[in-house]
Image (tube, coloured by chain):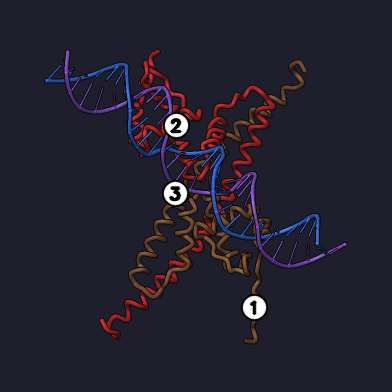
Chain colours: A red, B brown, C blue, D purple
Amino acid sequence: MALDQTQQTFGIAELAREFGITTRAIRFYEDKGLLSPARDGQRRIYGPRDHVRLRLIMRGKRLGFSLDEIREMIDLYDVDPTEVSQLKLFIGKLQARREQLRSQQEDIAETLAELDRLETQSQDLLAERESRRGKSAR
Amino acid sequence: MALDQTQQTFGIAELAREFGITTRAIRFYEDKGLLSPARDGQRRIYGPRDHVRLRLIMRGKRLGFSLDEIREMIDLYDVDPTEVSQLKLFIGKLQARREQLRSQQEDIAETLAELDRLETQSQDLLAERESRRGKSAR
DNA sequence: GCTTACGTTTACGTAAACGTAAAGTTCGCC
DNA sequence: GGCGAACTTTACGTTTACGTAAACGTAAGC
């Protein structure tokens, strides 16, 4: 074919550096079925697909999901869209996940609001203390 | 004093029911220094302050923080505001936490966007399959 | 005064997510 | 052909966040 996309590949150490994790972690994700790189003999060869998956994994972790949950989420992308019953189940899972994320959004909003209050308070206190430098003893 | 706020108290089982956790978890949080209820002999007596703290704990957990991190966050509320150096350190911590939360917000936004795409796709596929009921074999 | 419910401490068990050490392979290079 | 760097598997260790069981205390109700 004329348009042969120079399929980019990665070594395990390369990925580890890029994502700021250890090679041990990457192999662990493979053990858990989150990644399935190609092989060149013993060596693991990661393609663009694995790269995307790893990005999704890291995001999931930042969001506090377990690896099992993350695997479920990632598998959603690979669902076979030919079976209607599976599609319906799939959509259900999407909505459940959406609810969870909405709940997290609320939690973050509340926490940020509290942080705002605390910070304003502290800034005020700090300004007050520092403006009094001239008056009190050094 | 005329305005004696009928200080509401809670038993451990009461709290456990309200927050949907076990009494074991609550005692564990105490071990980790996240709670410090009063005592009536052996019994633990939880006041409004503990109630608030437990709410913060649960929120922190939903956001994927470890108990150690949550303790740090909660302790922010109890910082002594008389020491300037401590105040500055305090404000620094607030901003770090804020950054973390912002990052989580972005992650959630991205994930929700992807869920939208996936769901629209699936709905379309599903509608297509179901509209074809009349044509193909039952 | 015995049961039942609720609470207590002590302590060992467990699942998740890796860390870390051991021991061997494979590659490019000089 | 020997070296080092990067990789491999195997396997035991560690931390976190509780679960679970044992053995006991206390208070209410009948």
Residue at image location 32% in from the left, 81% down from the top = A132
Tell me the amino acid under the disc marked 1. Answer: Gln
Q: Are marks 2 and 3 on the same chain?
A: no
Q: Position of residue B57 (x, y in %)?
A: 54, 57
How far apart in space, not on screen, are marks 2 and 1 (Cα)?
55 Å
Q: Which residue is mark 3?
A: B103
Residue at image location 46% in from the left, 60% down from the top = B73
Quadrant position of the C terminus of chain B in the picture: top right
Q: Which mark is residue B112?
A: none
Residue A133 vertical placement versus A43 (above, below): below
Q: Residues within 10 Å of mark 1 (few under 14, many from 20)?
A: few
Q: Is residue A42 left or right of residue C12?
A: left
* Chain at tag 3: B
Count of numbered marks: 3
Q: Are marks 2 and 1 on the same chain?
A: no
Q: Which mark is residue A28?
A: 2
Q: Residues within 10 Å of mark 2 (few under 14, many from 20)?
A: few
Residue A57 vertical placement versus B25 (above, below): above
Residue B36 vertical placement versus A78 (above, below): below
Q: Which residue is mark 1?
A: B5
Q: Residues within 10 Å of mark 3 (few under 14, many from 20)?
A: some
Q: Position of residue B100 (x, y in %)?
A: 43, 52
Tell me the amino acid under the disc marked 2. Answer: Phe
Closer to the eye: label 2 or 3: 2
Residue at image location 39% in from the left, 25% down from the top = A46
Q: Could you say which is closer to the camera, residue B21 or residue B114? A: B21
Q: Position of residue B83 (x, y in %)?
A: 36, 73
How far apart in space, not on screen, are marks 3 and 1 (Cα)?
41 Å
